[in-house]
Image (cartoon, rainbow, N blue to C red):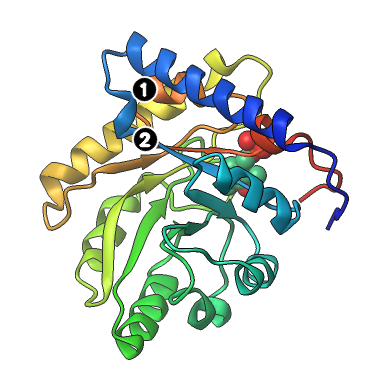
Amino acid sequence: MNKTIDLNAEQLAENIAQVRARIALAAERAGRDPAEITLVAVSKTKPVELVEMAYNCGVTDFGENRVQEALAKIARWHPQGLRWHLIGHLQSNKAAKVVEPFACVHSVDSLHLAQTLSRHAQELGKPLTILLQVNVASEASKEGMSPGELPELARQIVALPALRVEGLMTIAPLVSDPEEVRLVFRELRRLRDRLRIDVSASDWAQLSMGMTGDYSVAIEEGATIVRVGRAIFGQRAAPE
Ligand SMILES: *Cc1c(COP(=O)(O)O)cnc(C)c1O
């Protein structure tokens, strides 16, 4: 983990303001209210001091992709009103650790993981909000359910007792022109619209899609949660 803080409070505030402005512009182009879009600031590999600085700029939602790293940060700093999102792959054997500290797990990609989370949430008496991760572009390197298996898995997962299934998440392929992934976001929305009809036990309100390179396009295609790291905290030193 890169512990050097290479961003001062002023630059960070400027980055956040710029991201918020772009979110508002994209929402406006799509005829949407920017207030319906949640900005999750992705703080993976970044020190907790930067999380604190961003929180002081009004950011309330933070994303981490590794359980151990996230828990270390949460242990050091967990003010009222701050929500942590787990956005990276989660192994079932770590499921017990995430129910309490995380407000939302975006990366549920199997029935087994969902069952394990539900069991731990039930034991704790605290329902857990989750999203189902879909590998829309069927990339071999990516986690996530295939679009084909999504409806049946969704049906089984919404029936679990201690989970609140609020929507879908996807990670688009890395491309240089975000227009190339517009159809990926459109497809996730279409899959969501189908679920609203076929699996009506949830209203499938959330679409977590869009990162630094493509969040404007994702918002135009219906994102309700964008996960933005580099545009807020700067480049990451180490590959994650
Ligand atoms: C790292 C990461 C992000 C943020 O990526 P940036 O390009 O830094 O905005 C978003 N979502 C997931 C799942 C990630 O792992």
Above or below, comparing residue 118 to residue 176 in the picture: below
Residue drawn at point x = 72 percent, y = 54 percent: 49
Above or below, comparing residue 45 to residue 91 in the picture: above
Amino acid type of disc 1? Glu
Kindly tell me whether mark 2's CB lies below 8 Å from ligand 1.
no
* CA neighbours of label 2 inside 10 A, class few (<14), some (14 to 19), many (20+): many
Distance of label 2 from label 1 (alpha carbons) = 9 Å
Residue drawn at point x = 41 percent, y = 80 percent: 116
Name the spot of residue 47 as percent of width and height, x first.
Answer: 75, 55
Give the quadrant of the N terminus: bottom right
Classify mark 2: helix, strand or loop. helix
Name the spot of residue 79 as percent of width and height, x first.
Answer: 51, 63
Q: Do the residues labelled 2 and 1 touch (CB within 8 Å)?
A: yes
Would residue 141 be seen by someone viewing this image from the given angle? no
* CA neighbours of label 1 inside 10 A, class few (<14), some (14 to 19), many (20+): many
Amino acid type of disc 2? Leu
Residue drawn at point x = 36 percent, y = 18 percent: 27
Would residue 3 be seen by someone viewing this image from the given angle? yes
Decide which of tag 2 and tag 1 comes sooner along the chain.
2
Classify mark 1: helix, strand or loop. loop
Q: Quadrant of ligand 1?
A: top right
- Foreground pick, 186 / 25: 25
What residue does disc 1 label?
221
Q: Which mark is residue 188?
A: 2
Above or below, comparing residue 229 to residue 179 in the picture: below
* Left/right of residue 191 with respect to residue 14 in the rendered view: left
Q: Residue 109 carries which label?
A: none
Residue drawn at point x = 42 percent, y = 28 percent: 185
